Image: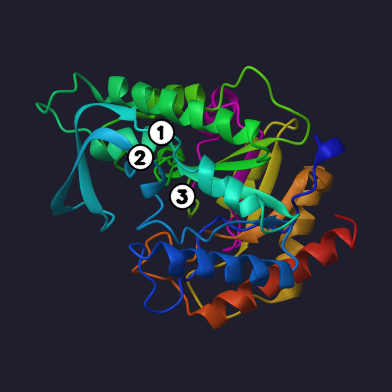
Amino acid sequence: MADTFNYRIDHHGSLVRPAGLSTDDPEAVAAAVREAVAHQRRLRSTVVTDGDFPREDFRSAVLDGVSGLRRTDEAGPDGLVRWVAESLPKADGPLVADSAARLAELTVIAPKASLPSPAYLAATTYRPGLGVSSARDLGEAFAEIVRAEIALLVARGVRLIQLDNPLLLDQLSTDPGDPGALSFEDALAVDALAVRLDERPEGVRIGMAPGWTAPAEVVRARAERLFAEIDADRWILPFDQGTPAELDLVKALPDDRDFCLGVVDATVPELEDVDTVMSRIDAVGEVKDLEDGAVSPSRGFANVASRPLLTAEDQRRKLVLVETIARYCWGNEF
């Protein structure tokens, strides 16, 4: 797919918010987004996001725009506030397409939109006895909403869209983790529905981030099934720890898919050694065409607005390092 690939220097979407920024202040949010766009341009990123500044957490891109769900006072196992589905969700209008269009007006760099995957939403919001017959039905309803939003984003000129499902990689292990309310098989079917567009214009990439860290050991057959059944163009994979499992994930990826390697750890301030990172990428180059590749941090820097993983300065240093690594790999030709 290297013929139209040009999003080499990437990041997951969320950035550290300015201190005191409230999503209840649209003017302050708009000003913060403008500064974030300028900051990303200065860092020479090849994609630009709004940093998730208008949202409470990475799920809000969908949860804030649909009916049928209720916010609770509970916290899930990931520490996020628990939402529960009381009926099948219905979209109240565009989810992020309007904000993506405003983002596009601020820069000529490709705007990127991130959405939680429908399988992830179903796995974490389904609760038996609340009016939804099954987690699979809930996931399929979310999938229709997300697929319609992806089509709208593409129609408005967005060329890079990322779905986040932090639960999937754990299911590739020899000792799979808890998939939530949705089985691995149902999760694949649901997320596959969301990315199944009738047309993909030139240069469009629908990406899938299946988790923030690789499992200790990858079951190759499950990894191949993941990549085969979800027809995403681009896979955003953790690649910051130097484990055999990280390379196994890349090896299992079909040759007709793009990949983005999360080469720096977004959870620790210490900078990675460039030579170490390049040696890992060299190992990828032995099994894949690096022209189909990109680099990014391992995950978002603030998937939850109130819980940034690093300081703004540490984030800047990490993003500069990502750009440096990209130029080591591909020179200045992006």
Instruction: Locate residue 13: give its quadrant.
Output: bottom right
Task: Look at the image and tell me in which quarter the C terminus lies.
Answer: bottom right
Q: To which residue does mark 2 refer?
A: 65
Q: Nearer the viewer, mark 1 or mark 3?
A: 1
Residue 96 placement (x, y as % from top left): 49, 43
Asked if the magenta segment contains residue 240, the reply would be yes
Callout 1–callout 2 Cβ contact below 8 Å: yes
* Residues packed near mark 1 inside 10 Å, few (<14), some (14 to 19) or many (20 plus): few
Q: Amino acid at mark 3?
A: Pro
Instruction: Locate residue 91: give its quadrant.
Output: top left
Q: Nearer the viewer, mark 3 or mark 2?
A: 2
Q: Secondary structure at mark 1?
A: loop
What residue do we see at 43% from left, 58% from top?
Answer: 54
* Residues packed near mark 2 inside 10 Å, few (<14), some (14 to 19) or many (20 plus): some
Asked if the magenta segment contains residue 128, the reply would be no
131 or 98: which is nearer to us? 98
Q: Amino acid at mark 1?
A: Gly
Relative to 88, residue 171 above or below = below
Give the label on residue 215, or none: 3
Counting residues from the start of the chain, the first of labels 1 and 3 encountered is 1
* Residues packed near mark 3 inside 10 Å, few (<14), some (14 to 19) or many (20 plus): many
Q: Is residue 127 left or right of residue 117?
A: left
Callout 1–callout 3 Cβ contact below 8 Å: no
Give the label on residue 93, or none: 1
Counting residues from the start of the chain, the first of labels 3 and 2 encountered is 2
